[in-house]
Amino acid sequence: MLASRNSSSHPVSFVLLEIPGLESSQFWIAFPFCAMYTVTVLGNITVLHIIQMDLILHEPMYLFLAMLVVTDLVLSSSTQPKMLAILWFHAHEIGYHACLTQVFFIHTFSSVESGVLTARASDHYVAICFPLCHSSILTPSVVGKLGAVGMLRGVLWVSSVCCMVSRMPFCQSRVIPQSYCEHMAVLKLVCADTRVNHGYGLFVAFSVGGFDIIVISVSYVMILRGVLQLPSGEAWLKAIGTCASHICVILALYIPALFPFLPHCFGHHVPQVVHIMFANVYLLVPPMLNPNIYGVRTKQIQDRVILGCCQKDP
């Protein structure tokens, strides 16, 4: 009864905030964020265009990379334009359904990205330990099915989370103390018992992340065993070099992901400015780094970028 008197079914909109304590500098803070977002979009679109246009790159490694690129574009574009609008134009308000849509895209495509990295670890394992069978095991059809399974997993898990939130009554407060909507932040505005929602959200996060980390870890243990059995040091270095960029991308995804997630669950003494900065870094830095990591580490992509830059019109 108390919840019903102090809440409504759902508000018309929410209010997103800029970085606390830096309000006077927010106009200038937006410029580096805008530059990072621009690099993210240009870098990912360049890699995607190269993979699409060059038939030689229509192999499992590059098809998984194309999936990762699309995922990064969706993740960064689901939050950064609104954040820039907040910092530059004080456009703090976001509609209720737009907020839930943002929750859906952020968590769905975070799950998809984790799934793609897991599939790439399996691809590396097959390529290094069973090189003669690689093309017959990981055909384009199998790669497409793995991508579809990862997408379906994210959609099903996160749709359930969004449906549960949409059925809850909200309190009068509409303020989300960060620059985008995500599940835990929205859940704090609910005027009801949210233990089931919290429990299910944690279950989804740990089941998806935990499963993927286990598969990635097992894949790399098997890869390490296979690499140590290679006859020459040159072959050993080549195998390690093949995996290096993937390991960098994994670290770039999972390490920043801990900072915005853990304070919601366990940390009540983390300064809000630190939490919000890391929350923005989590959704902007990995999508910006990924195409640069693969561009530096992958000779085929390097060659095609250089060729495209140096090519002159007749």
Image (spheres, rainbow, N blue to C red):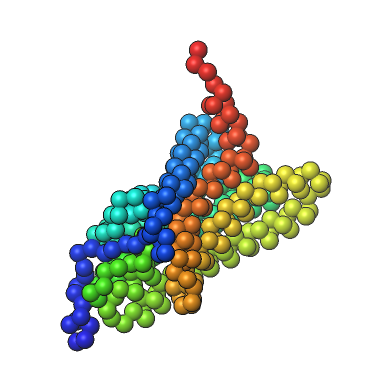
* Residue positioned 45% across, 58% down in the render: 280
Is residue 33 placed above or below 193 in the rendered structure? above
Drawn side of residue 148 relative to residue 170, left or right:
right
Percent x, y of residue 82: 33, 52
Q: Residue furthest bottom?
A: 1
* Quarter of the figure with the N terminus: bottom left
Q: Quadrant of residue 311?
A: top right
* Residue positioned 49% across, 16% down in the render: 313
Look at the image and tell me whether residue 246 can be seen: yes
Drawn side of residue 172 relative to residue 111, left or right:
left
* Residue positioned 62% across, 48% down in the render: 245
* Residue positioned 57% across, 52% down in the render: 249
Drawn side of residue 23 relative to residue 307, left or right:
left
Q: Nearer the viewer, residue 140 or 305?
A: 305
Q: Quadrant of residue 19?
A: bottom left
Percent x, y of residue 158: 37, 64
Look at the image and tell me whether residue 108 can be seen: no
Give the tally of numbered discs: 0
Q: Nearer the viewer, residue 126 or 308?
A: 308
Is residue 50 placed above or below 243 in the rendered structure? above
Q: Nearer the viewer, residue 306 or 231?
A: 306
